[in-house]
Image: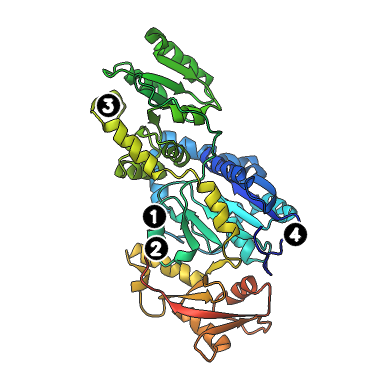
């Protein structure tokens, strides 16, 4: 069991873990379920609750964020891509949560208060932003983690306060540390996936290659075009087609492949996916973060079709860069593309080896270890620091190359050698006037005076000093930003 700390006393029952998601698509909730599954293997967790914050809000808000998003994906994908690119720069929007979001968050906030968590994991940026606000306002005093669910880091995930940030690949950490985030707060774990019961894999059975064609959980109509193209393959194969929850799609595809005899197996929604991934030789479908992560953990390469602009396109770029996927940009070439993979000697095996190499089956367990065994004090990113990080991103700068009052400095807790605050040089001046120590560092103290700061230092001090009256910290200029 983890040692107790002044900030998070461990009761006889252990940690109270709250996992927050948002049901925009199935991936975020799947990641939450994976973390819940991994929590069962830890002896220091007493109670776990998973909450979809959209289910706690009103129907209009939930439909606008969930159904509205996928309606745009179908009818105006260019608008989805535009919105993704617009919101990609980190801290493009600073300050408190907008009033409409906060109003809809009241039921979720009440549920969080009732549960009294000692640790919170967020698998969607909406609850991550909410939790940061609650942490800074003193509503909660829990270790908090932000867990990204795509291979490319998107700026909306970066919040003003958190204990640990978990990203899917090394390039994400390089990006964040180059922008000024401290390396000790960013960890590469991969995307959390559920670990299935170990069963024997039928891969390498000696028969024709097995395709797994997925329409996604909601039953994307593009799957019918994929299946139609496979009817013209020259290479030998068998295929399992998973149609998700769309009974109409399942019936349509069943009729389409009926003349092919037993070459095709057509399923609706199924819980057999983990076994199907282990048995298949090649996956054909969309590169959602969770789907791709599950395929890589199973050593299953992908033929990518119909990616959502933004995150899924970027997921696909990474998989292709690693040699674990190929992409079809038009339905007319799907059959030809699959034939190219199956027909070239050794190519399928090389792709399977590449997928196995980048798979991260232990991501969920690594997230919990990184959070619960990590620093007890959060990292605070002041609004000034947020402004500098955004400027570095927009000007294509490495944050350590910035000079002058807007350059960044870190406050380090010397006891655990962990960064607890990221702020601008000009913000540091106010702290030095009040809390300077003889050695040039600081001793932060509770400040009950009415004299105002130039920025939100009072909120930072309240968050960092909840367990005591003072905190010696070391001041460090931003070093060259490369992950440790």
Residue 140 drawn at (x, y percent): 67, 61
Q: Which tag, 1 or 3, sits closer to the chain's start?
A: 1
Q: Which tag, 4 or 1, sits closer to the chain's start?
A: 4
Compared with residue 7, is residue 292 higher up or lower down, i.e. above or below? above
Q: Residue most toward the bottom?
A: 438
CA–CA distance between discs 4 and 3? 60 Å
CA–CA distance between discs 1 and 2? 8 Å
Q: Which tag, 2 or 3, sits closer to the chain's start?
A: 3
Circle 4/circle 3 CB separation < 8 Å: no
Q: Which tag, 1 or 2, sits closer to the chain's start?
A: 1
Q: Secondary structure at mark 3?
A: helix
Circle 1/circle 2 CB separation < 8 Å: yes
- Quarter of the image where the C terminus is located: bottom left
Residue 57 in view in this figure? no
Q: Which tag, 2 or 4, sits closer to the chain's start?
A: 4
Compared with residue 212, is residue 196 higher up or lower down, i.e. above or below? below
Report which residue position mark 1 lands on: 170
Q: Secondary structure at mark 2?
A: loop
């Amino acid at each position: 069991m983890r040692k107790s700390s002044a900030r998070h006393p461990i009761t006889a029952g252990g940690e109270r873990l709250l996992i927050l998601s948002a049901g925009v698509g199935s991936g975020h909730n799947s990641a939450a379920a994976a973390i819940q599954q991994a929590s069962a293997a830890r002896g220091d967790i007493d109670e776990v609750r998973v909450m979809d914050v959209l289910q706690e809000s009103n129907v209009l808000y939930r439909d606008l964020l969930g159904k509205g998003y996928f309606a745009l994906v179908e009818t105006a994908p260019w608008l989805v891509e535009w919105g993704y690119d617009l919101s990609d720069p980190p801290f493009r929007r600073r300050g408190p949560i907008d009033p409409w979001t906060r109003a809809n968050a009241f039921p979720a906030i009440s549920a969080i208060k009732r549960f009294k968590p000692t640790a919170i994991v967020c698998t969607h940026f909406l609850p991550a932003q909410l939790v940061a606000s609650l942490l800074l306002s003193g509503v909660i005093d829990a270790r908090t983690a932000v867990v990204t669910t795509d291979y490319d880091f998107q700026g909306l995930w970066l919040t003003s306060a958190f204990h640990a940030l978990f990203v899917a690949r090394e390039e994400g950490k390089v990006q964040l540390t180059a922008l000024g985030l401290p390396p000790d707060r960013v960890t590469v774990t991969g995307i959390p996936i559920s670990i299935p019961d170990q069963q024997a894999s039928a891969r390498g059975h000696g028969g024709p290659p097995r395709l797994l064609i997925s329409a996604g959980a909601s039953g994307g109509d593009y799957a019918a075009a994929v299946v139609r193209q496979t009817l013209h393959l020259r290479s030998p194969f068998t295929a399992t087609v998973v149609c998700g929850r769309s009974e109409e799609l399942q019936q349509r595809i069943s009729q389409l492949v009926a003349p092919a005899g037993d070459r095709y197996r057509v399923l609706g929604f199924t819980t057999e996916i983990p076994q199907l991934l282990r048995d298949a030789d090649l996956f054909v479908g969309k590169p959602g973060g969770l789907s791709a992560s599950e395929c890589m953990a199973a050593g299953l390469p992908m033929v990518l079709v119909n990616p959502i602009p933004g995150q899924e396109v970027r997921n696909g770029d990474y998989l292709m860069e690693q040699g674990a996927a190929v992409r079809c940009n038009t339905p007319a070439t799907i059959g030809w593309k699959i034939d190219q993979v199956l027909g070239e000697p050794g190519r399928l095996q090389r792709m399977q080896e590449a997928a196995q190499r980048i798979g991260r089956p232990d991501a969920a367990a690594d997230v919990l270890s990184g959070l619960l065994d990590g620093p007890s004090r959060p990292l605070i990113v002041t609004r000034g620091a947020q402004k500098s990080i955004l400027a570095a991103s927009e000007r294509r700068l490495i944050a350590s190359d910035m000079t002058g009052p807007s350059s960044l400095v870190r406050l380090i807790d010397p006891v655990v050698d962990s960064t607890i605050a990221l702020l601008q040089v000009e913000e540091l001046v106010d702290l030095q006037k009040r809390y300077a120590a003889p050695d040039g560092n600081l001793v932060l103290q509770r400040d009950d005076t009415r004299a105002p700061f130039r920025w939100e230092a009072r909120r930072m001090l309240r968050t960092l000093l909840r367990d005591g009256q003072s905190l010696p910290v070391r001041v460090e200029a931003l070093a060259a930003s490369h992950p440790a």
